[in-house]
Image (tube, rainbow, N blue to C red):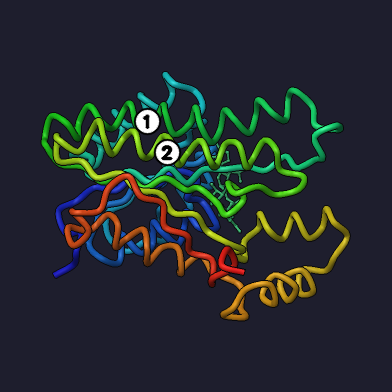
Amino acid sequence: MGRFDERVAVVTGAARGIGLAIATRFAEEGASVAVLDLDESAAQQAASGLPGKAVGIGVDVADVAGAEAAVDRVVAELGGVHVLVNNAGITRDNLLFKMSETDWDLVMNVHLKGAFAMTKAAQKHFVEQRYGKIVNLSSVSALGNRGQANYSAAKMGVQGFTRTLGIELGPFGVNANAIAPGFIATDMTDATAQRVGMSVEDFRAAAANRNPVKRVGHPEDIAAIAAFLCSDEASYVTGQTLYVDGGATLV
Ligand code: NAP
């Protein structure tokens, strides 16, 4: 018996990286999974590799009407919705004096408006059935990071959003929590290595050296925490942000 038998989980940005690991973990533990991503064929390809029932749906999470239509499609195709993981994300790093308005808006839209749009669409079902689990992806960058004024503002915004969801939705049987990962080895961090002119190996080794456990994180490290926070074992936890960073923010 899996912790997510009879549950339907929606994971955004799940065609690759952390989202794909989370989708895989839910599927392995019995959930039917909706893989949402910008590119529908990439989402469908990822869904086809999951064990159990899964669908891939193309959506830009920052498009409010599109997000609502995607959730409607999940309910129609998988028979309901019980878990939402707002994972879709992008970076557009630059020092503040060089940061364009477009890059500010893009990052705000994907992380904040995207989480708003998806959560608003899903909460309707959660409140009606008096059951729902929400996990939002924040980041250690929420605490401030050179070159990420847009991203750190959005990721701290995610934490405030999560606390408010905890307050508003708790009385309706809905838990909302956030995960703030440290360095996780994915395409996103590989792209940062390229941008700063380092090899992926050196960039990862430097990141590993900056935390007490002396290794980088992997998508599966985040998936395990997402599964716990969305399980009924965590039903007394809400509005929290859990830093999953090998202790990087301790030092
Ligand atoms: P990733 O490998 O770049 O994957 C992100 C996924 O989100 C991609 O498939 C991307 O699609 C999709 N996406 C982007 N914009 C979207 C939109 N508007 N609508 C729907 N899907 C969209 O990133 P990751 O490293 O797995 O990161 C996942 C989450 O964790 C993000 O929120 C990120 O900010 C957060 N995080 C990551 C790290 C880390 O070290 N990796 C650390 C802290 C927090 P395309 O491929 O089409 O662009």
Tell me whether the residue at label 1 lies in contact with that at label 2, contact meaning CB atoms closer than 8 angstroms. Answer: yes
Answer with the quarter of the image where residue 67 lies: top left
* Foreground pick, 29 / 50: 29
**Relative to residue 66, is residue 144 depicted above or below?**
below
Q: Residue at x 69, y 29 (%)?
A: 104
Residue 166, position as x, y percentages in the image: 28, 39
Q: Which residue is mark 2?
A: 57
Q: Residue at x 56, y 67 (%)?
A: 250
User: Is ligand 1 less than 8 Å from the beta carbon at label 1?
Assistant: no
Q: Residues within 10 Å of mark 1 (few under 14, many from 20)?
A: many
Q: Amino acid at mark 1?
A: Ala
Q: Residues within 10 Å of mark 2 (few under 14, many from 20)?
A: many
Q: Earlier in the sequence, mark 1 or mark 2?
A: 2
Tell whether 225 sits left or right of 109: left
Q: Which residue is mark 1?
A: 70
* Foreground pick, 201 / 156: 156
Answer with the quarter of the image where residue 124 lies: top left
User: Callout 1: helix, strand or loop?
Assistant: helix
